[in-house]
Amino acid sequence: MRILHTSDWHLGRSLEHICRIDEQRSFIDCLVNLAEEKDIDIVLIAGDIYDTYNPSAAAEELFYEAMDRLGGKGKRAVIVIAGNHDNPDRLCAASPLAYKNGIILLGYPGSDAGAYKTDDGDIHIVDSGAGWLEISVPGCDSNAVIIAMAYPSESRLEELLTDMADEGELQKAYSERIGSIFSELSGKYRDDTVNLLVSHLFLLGGSTSDSERTLQVGGAMTVDPAVLPEKAHYAALGHLHRPQQIRSAACPAYYAGSPLAYSFSEADYSKAVFIVDAVPGEEAVIEPVYLDCGKPLMRWYAEEGIGQAIEWCEEGKDPNAWVDLEILTDRVLTMDEQKMLRSLHPGIINIRPRLRTEDVQVMSPVSREGRRIDELFRDYYRYRMGVDIPDELMEAFLDVINDGHEEYDRGEDAPESSAGDVTQESSAGDVAQEGSTGDDAPEVSAGDVRDMGGTLEGGAGTDEA
């Protein structure tokens, strides 16, 4: 039996303001071709199919197209579980149609595939229960028994694991509960079947990036790799975006990672899927297949200033990449300079000036007295971002201020003066909240104004995301 393991598609996800649905479609083409070329029997997709609970129509259309093509009209089984980004019910809404084509959609940790059991077609669910199924696939001499645990949050498990606030106790209770479920379900494994596990969770020891959504503050929802069932030929995992093996696990356990780099922290990651050959009673043979179906993400460090960045663009450096550009500079970059860089290389996503000196003059409280709030915000943006604020963002900021005064006119709390007349007497906290100067700066959309960073009090603040 040959299994293909993939995960974390995040269909519909963008990079800053750039839609990447075409790159995701290219990945689906690669995956379908691979499934055909390698004669795959079962495809395991370990969660985070979509990037949001309410995916776009284009993202849903691409998923349905992918399922139709991967299933090959019943040629191979496709098992899909929900991740923490997925709406379990929405993901499984197409189950009555999907199951007829050997596509099994499981939204919750205790989902029972038998609810859609059918004797029609070549793919047959032989038996199933809460969290597991046995499936027969045409051309295979043995069946597969699969433990399928979609993202197991406390709410999706429908149980409170502990009422203790200590993070260590929470982590221990959570890991033990997941382990007890695996232990119980592994009783369905047999010596004459290929025994598999597919789940979306965070094993201790896994390597993260900044594009995975934290499952819980701290490490409370992490799982000890030792609790995975020893009898499993292979554990197909989702959530972490770097392809990797968890060597401390009780069975061969791998994260396939995301098919595309979804943040610049993944710029150096290889992207892969895994092909697993398994027969009852023998160790599985596991092979990574590396992907090159999306645009690479590159980080440029122009230590010699903007002239070096311009030279790179004119030379055609990394022409097909998305670029995060950091420029070491003695001064603020003008909007014209930013526009020129983007015109020379349309793939530049972020331009992040870094001042050579830390001796940045801070406005004193006296110098701020009597100044208009729009002037303060303009100065603050230049201080935090190293560039002049775009006109459209300044307009959006003023709209936010004016909206507050409209609410006041309706009887709600608001400052007593108009946007143009507001002075430093309005607190900095009324203007904006601390933001990040990491990968996402300085590309700040109008919709992000309310989350735009910092304090106008003149301190350096923090850069924590």
Image (spheres, rainbow, N blue to C red):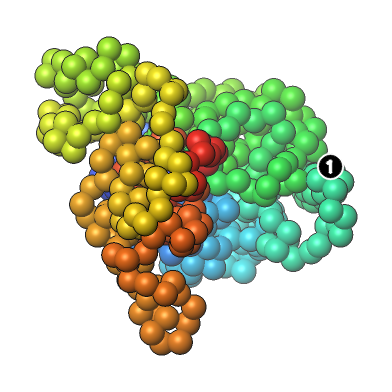
In front of the other: 277 or 271: 271
Identify which residue is drawn at 37% across, 64% down. 422
- Can the viewer see residue 164 in this picture? yes
Q: Is residue 150 above or below residue 314?
A: below
Q: Determine whether, in the image, residue 96 is placed left or right of residue 63.
A: right
Q: Determine whether, in the image, residue 13 is placed left or right of residue 107.
A: left
- Can the viewer see residue 146 in this picture? no
Quadrant of the rendered image containing residue 303: top left
Residue highlighted by disc 1: 168
In front of the other: 401 or 84: 401
Q: Determine whether, in the image, residue 244 is placed left or right of residue 457.
A: right
Q: Secondary structure at mark 1?
A: helix
Name the residue at the top extreme.
Answer: 304
Identify which residue is drawn at 20% across, 52% down. 391
Identify which residue is drawn at 32% across, 34% down. 386
Q: Determine whether, in the image, residue 72 is placed left or right of residue 243.
A: left
In front of the other: 50 or 355: 355
Q: Quadrant of the N terminus?
A: top right
| Residue 323 point in image, percent of width and height | 29, 29
Q: Is residue 402 above or below residue 354?
A: below
Q: How many marks?
A: 1
Quadrant of the rendered image containing residue 406: bottom left
Identify which residue is drawn at 56% across, 52% down. 83
Q: Is residue 40 above or below residue 418?
A: above
| Residue 276 point in image, percent of width and height | 55, 30
Q: What is the three-letter code of the residue carrying label 1?
A: Gly
